[in-house]
Image: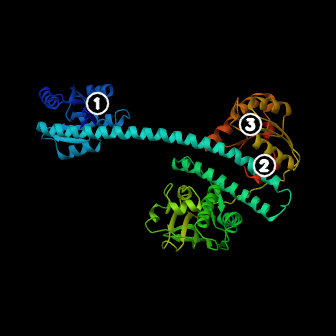
Amino acid sequence: MQKNNGRAREHVGKLLNVNDNEVARYLGTTMLRRAGLDVIEAASGMDALEMVHRELPDVVVLDVKLPDIDGFEVCRRIKANPRTAGVKILHTSATFVSLDKKVQGLDIGADGYLTQPFEATELVATVRSLLRLAQAERELRARADRLAEADRRKDEFLAMLAHELRNPLAAITASLPMLEQRDAVNQGERRAREVLRRQTVHLARLVDDLLDVSRVTQGKIELRLEPVDLKSLLARVVLTTRERGTNPRGQTLALALPDAPIQVRGDVTRLEQIFTNLLDNASKYTDVGGHIRVSLEPASVGGARFARITVRDDGVGIAADALPMIFGLFAQASVTLARSRGGLGIGLTLVRTLVELHDGEVEARSEGIGHGAEFEVRLPLLDLAETGERASLRGLTELRRRRICIVEDNVDAQQALGDLCEMWGHEVHAASDGIVGVGKVLELLPDVTLIDIGLPGIDGFEVVRRLRADPRGKGLWLVALTGYGSPEQRTTALSVGFDVHLVKPVEVHKLQELLDAGPPPMRASRP
């Protein structure tokens, strides 16, 4: 719609009138022009296609019977071309055209159908209706484009935000083991250490969730599927939740497991994320002294076999009107309650999306406020009779002192990471920008090089390109230790020459295991 002197008027679009009969074409064009509409003409199907491509009219008034190709084929070609698919088609025909032809025209994409002879008012009203539809679709496409651009900028902002948040988190995470080398002098210091450790993990998880929710809603998560034993996985998740969540809150967390293994095909990291989020959610909404129970059992419905995992708590519960929205993005049953108990309202959205990516289902149940809640996850069982289980054979790693070079511009993160590696007995060197880092690495030829991607001067990608371009750098073991953690960034890191991509703050034990294991046996032969 456009506005003139404060009054809204219809968008005056361009029309193409296609008819090989000169009299019929003249009458139709006259009717439309008298109504104030802009009309161009064509006398054949091929001429119509050329004019549609060149002029991009809003509406084509298209006679079915044409001398070269009929109106059905013209319509089909217009609608099949992405550039012209939005053009509205009004088929017209003589009275002898059968009903099945009208249906055929609508089925191939026509937006309306008039049978001759028709009154001027009927033609003009129908065309104006199609013009309004075309204008509404243009506005929707423009709005969709604006939203897509805003979404792209949001993703860029989140990636940068995560990088900026992960740098201080990495420094804190690396510093904690240094503090724990000596016993706490009193109970207050011991509690302070526990708070630091617990809240650092919580912050890291919030950053990961914030990024993950953006990726999963766009379908950018790729699962690394393998056979997974849910018994072992749930035992690990429950143990971690007890240490970091339920025990400090005085809650009881019980786990009921079957005797036999229960395997599914899944991504270990994402499955742990599902159940960690569910348990964190249960603990968050359960008062001090409350109870949480996790159970795992095989089940079958209609011949389909699946693993059923339930997480039940006796916490605040969920109101009946909130249950249908509980898995929505940023949805919270009670904003005031949610704010007082922490969280961003995105954990359950991640749970649902990740479960569905595993071809599973998740359901929330509650008898109302004050009656607790239960979440049930159902995942397809892995048929062990059809899938050979491959044992993972790990060779003994040689634990030895390694020469490590850290290329990191964040002074605190660099110092904390260096102190941690030295505490483990390694020789540490450091550089604070990319240019210096390239020179130092090629001079030292370290066993392991930890490189941040967001560096001043030249970024970590360019550092690796220059190292790999030098004959001395072809056999180096290069590890990206960065706040940029999207799958696209990981793929880019590996493609430019990194051997490993780790996201800050890396868990201390994982970094230690990485350094202990060293490069793979064939690393030195890298082309």
Badge 3 density bin: few <14, some 14–19, many ≥20, Cα 10 Å: many
- Residue that mark 3 sits on: 409
Badge 2 density bin: few <14, some 14–19, many ≥20, Cα 10 Å: some
Looking at the image, which residue is at 12% across and 36% down?
120
Check if mark 2's residue and mark 1's residue have beta carbons within 8 Å.
no
> Distance from label 2 to label 3 (Cα)?
22 Å
Return the disc, 2 or 1, that comes first in the chain's sequence. Answer: 1
Q: Callout 2, which amino acid?
A: Leu
Nearest the eye: 486 or 470: 486
- Residue that mark 2 sits on: 514
Return the disc, 1 or 3, that comes first in the chain's sequence. Answer: 1
Nearest the eye: 7 or 132: 7
Q: Quadrant of the C terminus?
A: top right
- Residue that mark 1 sits on: 57
- Residue 227 at x, y percent in the picture: 65, 59
> Distance from label 1 to label 3 (Cα)?
57 Å
Query: In screen coordinates, is 366 left or right of 239?
Result: left
Q: Quadrant of the N terminus?
A: top left
> Distance from label 2 to label 1 (Cα)?
63 Å
Can the viewer see residue 123 in this picture?
A: yes
Looking at the image, which residue is at 13% across and 41% down?
96
> Under tag 1, what secondary structure?
loop
Q: In this rendering, is residue 99 above or below 466?
A: below
Return the disc, 2 or 3, that comes first in the chain's sequence. Answer: 3
- Nearer the observer: mark 1 or 3; the answer is 3
Check if mark 1's residue and mark 3's residue have beta carbons within 8 Å.
no
- Residue 400 at x, y percent in the picture: 88, 48
